[in-house]
Amino acid sequence: MANDSDAYVRWDSGFQLVLRAMKKMILEHLQHKTLKVDSSLLEALGEVLGRADQDPALAAELLTLPEDSVLENQLEFIDPQSLALVREELEKAIGIKFEKKLFDLYKRYNHDEPYIYTPKAVAARSLKNVCLGYLVATGHDTYNQLATAQLTKSNNMTDQRAALQALTHAMGPLRDQALKIFYKQWKDNTLVMNKYFQAQASSRSHGVTSFIQSLAADPAFDMDNPNRIKSLFGAFVKNGVHFHNKDGAGYRLIADQILRLDEKNPMLAASLSGGFASWMKHDDHRRMLMKNELSRILAKPGLSKNVTEVISKTLAMEQAM
């Protein structure tokens, strides 16, 4: 992971190592075993951090965990809570284990210089922000304050967004403060506000599903803007811990949006319907809840061909099993 001279080979070997470690932790959690982070993974990540100055861009990539969708494709059975817990535990373990190295790198690459867009500057921001994410994951309020300071003082959107994203998973006044600061600064910028809605829809903190509905009623949210809808509802269907909550509220919320959108934008509604594509990989309870919502959508009179095709194929997966 840290020694090969070929950058792609290093990235791929590191990616596979992280995948294996996360899959192992997920299986251990499902078997009610105590979660343990693979020591070989921590050792490899320590070497990456130790050599980060040689290639900051590659180091940032090697330190970035795979998305849930990648893990889901590797698993025969999906347990959203296990995925979320493993991610949180791994992020926290990395943050605590390498706290000093991460903070040193953060300080080294946290430049106060005017914003420039060069490969070197982009790499510095990427590495700095990955380090910030792990530091915030430790749960220490000092790093929440650090992220808030970056949000308020940064002269570029990349750093502000990274700070906001790190804080959205936390609970407490600093998270709320960060959201208010970002909203006040960018509420009139359509493209930037997409990032605001996306960050909140992706949050692992409590109460996101009900909060999504209040965000949809916000004056800055435009129900007729496809990109706004993708930033909020599209991001929410990728938020496994809340979309797949066992109370079924996430499924109902998205099914309602699909039915509403189908009348105005069938292609977007069909795209959102893809959030149910993995339904047969879930437990019986979640499968039943998703099947009920899929059937409700399909039963709508005058349903568009776009959505009908996606939903019909999704439901047909049950017969293929």
Image: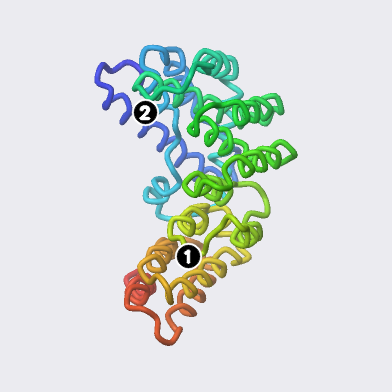
Tell me residue 174's x, y (percent).
Answer: 71, 36
Q: Amino acid at mark 2?
A: Gly
> Which residue is label 2 attached to?
14
Residue 7 sits above or below residue 218 on the image = above
Q: Quadrant of the C terminus?
A: bottom left
Q: Residue most toward the right?
A: 173
Identify the residue at horizontal 57%, vertical 63% (top origin): 250
Q: Quadrant of residue 280?
A: bottom left
Identify the residue at horizontal 35%, vertical 71% (top origin): 310
Residue 201 in view (yes/no): yes
Identify the residue at horizontal 26%, vertical 16% (top origin): 5
Name the N-terminal-most of marks 1 and 2: 2
Q: Residue most toward the left?
A: 6
Name the secondary structure under disc 2.
Answer: helix
- Disc 1 crowd rating (10 Å Cα; few below 14, some 14-19, many 20+) is few
Q: Quadrant of residue 64?
A: top left
Q: Amino acid at mark 1?
A: Asp
Tell me residue 99's x, y (percent).
Answer: 59, 19
Q: Quadrant of the N terminus?
A: top left
User: In this orientation, which residue lies closer to the viewer: 61 or 157?
Assistant: 157
Q: Quadrant of residue 97?
A: top right
Left/right of residue 13 with respect to residue 237 in the rendered view: left
Proximity of marks 1 and 2: CB atoms separated by less than 8 Å: no
CA–CA distance in space, label 1 to label 2: 42 Å
User: In this orientation, which residue lies closer to the viewer: 1 or 116?
Assistant: 116
Tell me residue 271's x, y (percent).
Answer: 38, 63
Residue 30 in view (yes/no): no
> Which residue is label 1 attached to?
224
